[in-house]
Image (tube, rainbow, N blue to C red):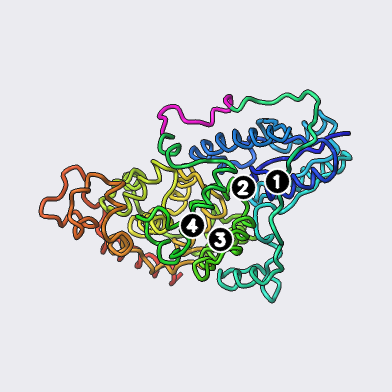
Amino acid sequence: MNPVIVWFRQDLRLADNPALTHAMATGAPVLGLYVLDDETPGAWRLGGASRWWLHESLQALSSNLAEICGRLILRRGRADTAVASLAKEVGAAGVVWNRCYEPYAVERDKRLKADLTQAGIAADSFNGSLLAEPWEVRTGAGTPFKVYTPFWRALRALPDSGKPLPAPKAITPFVGKVATDRLADWALLPHKPDWAGGLRETWMPGEAGARKRLSRFLKHLKGYRAARDRPDDDDGTSHLSPHLHFGEISPRQVRHAVQTGEHGDDGDKFLSELGWREFSYHLLFHNPALPEAPLDAKFAHFPWTGSDAQFKAWSKGQTGYPIVDAGMRQLWHTGYMHNRVRMIAASFLIKHLAIDWRRGEAWFWDTLVDADLANNAASWQWVAGCGADAAPFFRIFNPVLQGEKFDPDGAYVRCWVPELAGLADKFIHKPWLAPTPPENYPEPIVDLAEGRARALAAFKGLSRE
């Protein structure tokens, strides 16, 4: 029989994989494919930290497929060309995939599906990445949502999609000879400098790592509502975001695991945070320019006055504000930053330094292992005050007060800014006031009051336009 190609994308798993399940149900031989496409995404090609994760995750997926007699073919180049070429090469009866929602992916997949169909090759796509498709959740007037709370309420009112699909126990392999790239030749791992040591210490990419991370989190879910804002509590959040982005676990699997336990209000709160991921995809699908253009058009004329030197200090964790610097250093070392600290660091860049949110968005894209176009863009616009359901621009996070509230003992700061470790708790978030300020830590690069006043003045100026 002619094979069915399963085109893996952001669904690097065997369990609860609708495309793979459909291919298995045909009874035909199944051939897995992954295409590294650095052309179609343009500026949003995978960043450095994501490339490290992808290498590790593809290794895990290839191994998992081999255990059930499957194969993963690797190709590089324009994905639509590579998929069509392999389909012709092996005489494929069909090609299946789980949908992606980035604007370039939506357009590419439409063209590819039309081309394959015209060539007599069945092409089917499925929802393997979201609890509900972006077009399924609508307001009473039939329009897309712009505010999170009613969006989440509407999504939860949809019929439950049922239990997650099981992983296949065996695959009918395609026995023909097929050329494949070597993963090592893609050079996804960093070499100069090799900054991935912290990533290896922190993460276990792959489907097994995702299941392990979820299991660990469920044991600590009690108290989540309060713990989620404490960056010094490593078990306070799920750390599932990179696993979800690369599809090593599905949101349906996560929701099912939470709902089948007795987690009460903490479980509901966690699921509502999963809902923010859904809302971000909803926004991106209905607003394809989200990563580049403010949803609130008047912010297109915002007077960004911050300097390159200030941006460099921010990116290196040398701003003189400990909670900001701790977050930026955690990001560089682990490819991750606690969500509360992300908001603080982003607010500081945009509002105190007056630096364009898109520069921060691009930095996060390159350095986060969970870099996700929908989440990244929607979150930066939320902090900037120019997105849907955005924080008002006059909501300006004070990094000192935020640090004192959410890292009261300074444990998080001491972990990532060791030059401050010897300071007393009352000075840990404002070291310049210590009787003997540390010599090897920078002075604040901006006065908070002046930065706040400048931001508010700029916002009022926009409001008058």
Disc 1 versus disc 3: distance between alpha carbons?
Answer: 23 Å
Is residue 419 depicted above or below 133 in this figure? Answer: above
Specify the segment rendered in magenta.
184-195
Disc 4 versus disc 2: distance between alpha carbons?
Answer: 22 Å
Q: Dot 2, how many residues are within 10 Å of its Cα: few (below 14), some (14-19), or many (20+)?
A: many
Mark 2 vs 1, N-terminal side: 1
Q: Dot 4, how many residues are within 10 Å of its Cα: few (below 14), some (14-19), or many (20+)?
A: few
Amino acid type of the residue that numbered disc 4 sits on in the rendered structure:
Lys
Write down the residue under mark 3.
274
Q: Nearer the viewer, mark 2 or mark 1?
A: 1
Residue 454 at least partly seen = no
Disc 3 versus disc 4: distance between alpha carbons?
Answer: 18 Å
Q: Of helix, strand and loop, which one carries label 4?
A: helix
Amino acid type of the residue that numbered disc 3 sits on in the rendered structure:
Leu
Of the pair 36 and 214, the residue shown nearer to us: 214
Picture coordinates of residue 326, whole percent (x, y):
32, 49
Mark 1 vs 3, N-terminal side: 1
Q: How many marks?
A: 4
Q: Of helix, strand and loop, which one carries label 3?
A: helix
Task: Verify whether residue 262 appears in magenta.
Answer: no
Q: Is residue 182 left or right of residue 452?
A: right
What is the number of the mark on residue 124?
A: none
Task: Verify whether residue 191 appears in magenta.
Answer: yes
Q: Dot 3, how many residues are within 10 Å of its Cα: few (below 14), some (14-19), or many (20+)?
A: some
Q: Is residue 340 left or right of residue 375?
A: left
Disc 2 versus disc 1: distance between alpha carbons?
Answer: 14 Å
Picture coordinates of residue 463, whole percent (x, y):
44, 71
What is the number of the mark on residue 167?
A: 1
Write down the residue under mark 4.
219
Mark 4 vs 2, N-terminal side: 4
- Tell me which secondary structure the magenta stretch mostly adopts: loop
What is the number of the mark on residue 247?
A: 2
